[in-house]
Amino acid sequence: MKNQKEFTARAWLMFGLFAALGISIFGRILWIQSAEHEQWKEVGERFESSVRDINPSRGQIYAINGNVLATSVPIFEVRWDSKSEAINWNVFDSELDSLCLGLSKILGDRNQREYRELLRNGRNLGRRNTLIARRASYIQQKEIAQLPFVRRGRFKSGFTFTRTEQRQKPFGDLASRTIGIDRNENRVGLEASWNNELSGNIGKQIQRRVAGGEWMPVSDDFIIEPKAGLDVISSIDMHLQDVASSALRQQLQAHDAAWGTVILMEVKTGMIRAMANLTRSSKEPQEGESSVYFESFNHAIGRAVEPGSTFKLASLMTAMSAGNVQPDDQIDTGNGITYFYGKRMSDSNADRGGSGILNTTEIFELSSNVGTALTIKNAFGDDAQIFLNGLQDIGVHAPTGLRLAGESTPLVYQKVGEGRWSGLSLTQMSIGYEVTQTPLQTLNLYNAVANNGQSLRPQLVERLESNGQVVKTFQPEVLNQRICAPNVLAACQNMLERVADPEGKGTAQFIFAKSPYRVAGKTGTARIAGPNGYDGRYRASFAGYFPAENPRYSCIVVIADTRSGVYYGSSIAGPVFRELANKVYATDPSFHTTSTGLLAENCKLPGSKDGAQTDLIRLYETLEMPYEGIGSGDWVTVTTSDSTAVISTRNIASNRVPDVRGMGLRDALYLLENAGLKVKTLGMGTVRRQSLPPGADLKSNIAITIELS
């Protein structure tokens, strides 16, 4: 019993000792958290430091002509540390009013009194990260740094400036999708594909954590100094980019199309000088307004579609290379309608009786579906694999490898029987169906034909620079030294020239009739496949190069799903090609030979639209251009040869529908509206068609539609 009492006494003694110890520890914790809080907080902040990553300045993206396409603009977060050890509070009090007045003038978001209250509260509460400005510009930061008290320096004033970079595109939407977007995830365009070069090298710096979880540099020194990214000098020419985008936008709005793209490429280098991509806004326009278009998707490289008739170049090139087909071999296209396995195929002129017997060159020139399909079937019907092998030899089955994020892979059968291959596949492929390519992949073949058969990888970057010094220059990259034999290449070049020959009968006969240069190219009009098959929507295209005799540039225009009722490649895509080519020809001095006169020797006279005689004669005399003939009336027709322009009278009868074909829009509108007609226009350029026949009886207040190209 005695032992039990002793054990109980000892237990209570131990319990009392532990209880007292616990109470003393708890009391000490309360004391530290209250009376000694600021003292230990400062000690903790002094020792809670870490080596932090410092992001470098991102490189800029330039156009080849020096325009800045994407740049990093510095943005500064301005904070005040009231616990900075070297602050002289007498100086702070004496300069506070001047400081607050300066902050109010520079930042403009608070008045002098509000800044004084902000700083005094920061001092009274001992704050180490009072926010002064979250997004001060570079100029504002420089001005703040010169204010009274702040100019004493970081440690004597407590003011800190944390720099971040904000990416901006000075040209806004122009080439926006090609330039791309800089963000932490899902970058696109050049910003994505050249991110390693643009990013630079991350630096290291010791920083300490302050109240609120913010980090502040211990000093301005770096453990590893950040290295700025390289500047990317792109191949884009902003003057040509502007022309391409403007011409494309006008045509899209005129025909209310869903989307469109233009690519202009230098033949000998593969450098892309312009790449415009526009998509119609999903928001329907108000009555009387045009649809809005913006760069939201890179159709040029990301949209693989059935190319339609522009693929006939690859088909007939393969036939002449591997199928014993000659340019003068004849095919009877009959009335422009034929059937393969019960499926109807027709030509655009089938309603007018077709074209009958055509040779290979004429088949291409007239873009005969029936002729192309029969040619390919006759050449490869017994062994379609030879046709597929020939397409692979040309290279149309592979991506271009352009260093730009998002290029789609073309879908071209490589083996008979794969995928959805059927008995119709051979003939459907021959005219550009059951295959898909991006516009750039289509253009690359045309560029190879222009480049004497040598296929180059398209490129968007000319060189890399650092502080104005060239770090690396990119040379042309050969994909295929020779896509076909010289005789086949010559035949293809001739066929392409015939398509756009103003004196011929090709599908682009009228587009370049007034141009002072020759074009080689191919129109394309492809039906658009929907969920229920081909439902009456079309995609228009024109691919080619110029000048035909000495190619300098290749170009493709694709415009999809117009609502205007006009959908042929010659009427929709061709005019955009022409406008861009005209700009290149007019502004590139290498196209022109200088001489003592206005016109160089052996230089073709530029064509002229028909129109008002007085204006035309004044123009010819001002430019010292030779002309012959004088019309007897106010309106004339102009025929231009290599050496002179011949002016002849154009009779405009009263009370009859005027003939405005061959005129520009201004003169055509003048005549038609003065005749009392309500005019609707389609396209741009020169009037090619008018809905009311010339010379018909004139009735007031009736409508006429004129189509320009």
Image (cartoon, rainbow, N blue to C red):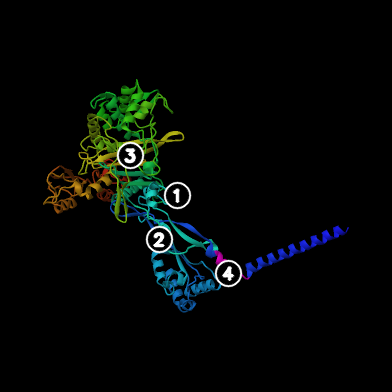
Q: Residues within 10 Å of mark 2 (few under 14, many from 20)?
A: some
Q: Which-is-in-front pick, marks 3 and 4?
A: 4
Q: Secondary structure at mark 3?
A: strand
Main structural element of the magenta stretch: helix, strand or loop?
helix
Q: Earlier in the sequence, mark 2 or mark 1?
A: 2
The answer to whether residue 707 is magenta is no
Q: Amino acid at mark 2?
A: Pro
Residue at mark 2: 74
Q: Are marks 3 and 4 in contact (CB under 8 Å)?
A: no
Residue at position x 12%, y 50% in the image: 595
- Residue 34 appears left or right of 525: right
Residue depth check, mark 2 versus mark 1: number of the one nearer the observer: 2
Residue 17 % position (x, y) = 75, 64
Residue that mark 4 sits on: 39
Residue corresponding to mark 1: 283
Q: Amino acid at mark 4?
A: Gln
Single out the mark in the foreground, 2 or 4: 4
> Please, is residue 134 above or below residue 700 in the view?
below
Residue type (three-letter) at the residue carrying disc 3: Ser
Comes first in the chain, label 2 or label 3: 2
Question: Magenta part of the protein: which range?
Answer: 35-44
N-terminal-most mark, 1 or 3: 1
Q: CA distance from mark 3 to mark 4?
A: 76 Å
Mark earlier in primary sequence (2, 4): 4
> Residue at 22% of width from left, 32% of height from top?
490
Is residue 261 visible in the rendered image? The answer is: yes
Considering depth in this image, is 325 or 693 the residue closer to the camera? 325
| Residue count near mark 1 (Cα–Cα under 10 Å), binned few <14, some 14–19, many ≥20 | few
Distance from the alpha carbon under mark 1 to that under mark 4: 61 Å
Numbered marks: total: 4
Q: Which residue is mark 3?
A: 541
Q: Is residue 152 placed above or below 203 in the rendered structure?
A: below
